[in-house]
Image: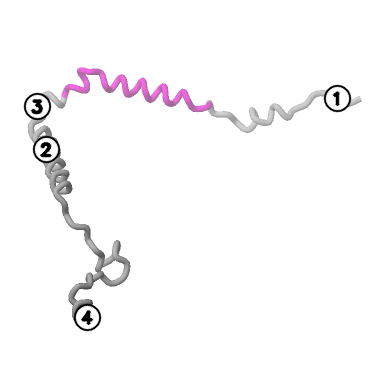
């Protein structure tokens, strides 16, 4: 009986079984392999696109100027600066406290 208990018991790692040096790793299934294969294929397609760009190096240097991207960026920055409140001095803030009413 004791021999069967020793031989048939499941060996567990020391400490917490889900973290640490001696953790219990999940077994790799067929779905995990298929998912990893799909992710690697997508990454390979992305790398193929990056290796063969749409524009050549000479074309990529002048495309922003041709599209007017610099002007668009300047206009966007002007619009974003208009969203902020104008600069106000301390004197302008304290003008509301001035009171010319005389108490009789």
- Circle 2: is it few (<14), some (14-19), or many (20+) Cα within 10 Å? few
Q: Quadrant of residue 11?
A: bottom left
Magenta-span inclusion, residue 65: yes
**Residue 99 horizontal side relative to residue 24, left or right:** right
* Residue holding disc 3: 56
Mark closer to the observer (2, 1): 2
Residue 20 position within the rendered picture, expressed as x and y whole percent measured from the top left = 28, 65
Measured Cα–Cα span from mark 3 to mark 4 = 77 Å
Q: Which mark is residue 1?
A: 4
| Tag 3–tag 4 contact (CB < 8 Å) | no
From which residue to which does the magenta span run?
Answer: 62-85
8 w.r.t. 56: above or below: below
Q: Residue at x 22, y 77 (%)?
A: 5
Mark closer to the observer (3, 1): 3
- Callout 3: SS: loop
Measured Cα–Cα span from mark 4 to mark 1 = 107 Å
Q: Quadrant of residue 35?
A: top left
* Residue holding disc 1: 102
Mark closer to the observer (3, 4): 4
Chief secondary structure of the magenta span?
A: helix
17 w.r.t. 50: above or below: below
Give the position of the C terminus as an image quadrant: top right
Mark closer to the observer (4, 1): 4
Measured Cα–Cα span from mark 2 to mark 1 = 80 Å
Q: Which mark is residue 47?
A: 2
Give the position of the N terminus as an image quadrant: bottom left
């Amino acid at each position: 009986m004791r021999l069967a208990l020793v031989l048939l018991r499941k060996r567990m790692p020391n400490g917490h079984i889900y973290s640490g040096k001696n953790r219990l790793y999940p077994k790799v299934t067929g779905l995990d392999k298929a998912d990893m294969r799909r992710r690697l294929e997508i990454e390979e397609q992305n790398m193929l696109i990056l290796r063969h760009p749409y524009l050549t190096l000479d074309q990529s240097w002048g495309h922003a100027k041709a599209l007017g991207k610099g002007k668009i960026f300047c206009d966007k920055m002007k619009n974003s600066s208009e969203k902020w409140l104008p600069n106000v001095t301390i004197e302008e803030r304290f003008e509301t406290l001035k009171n010319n009413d005389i108490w009789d």
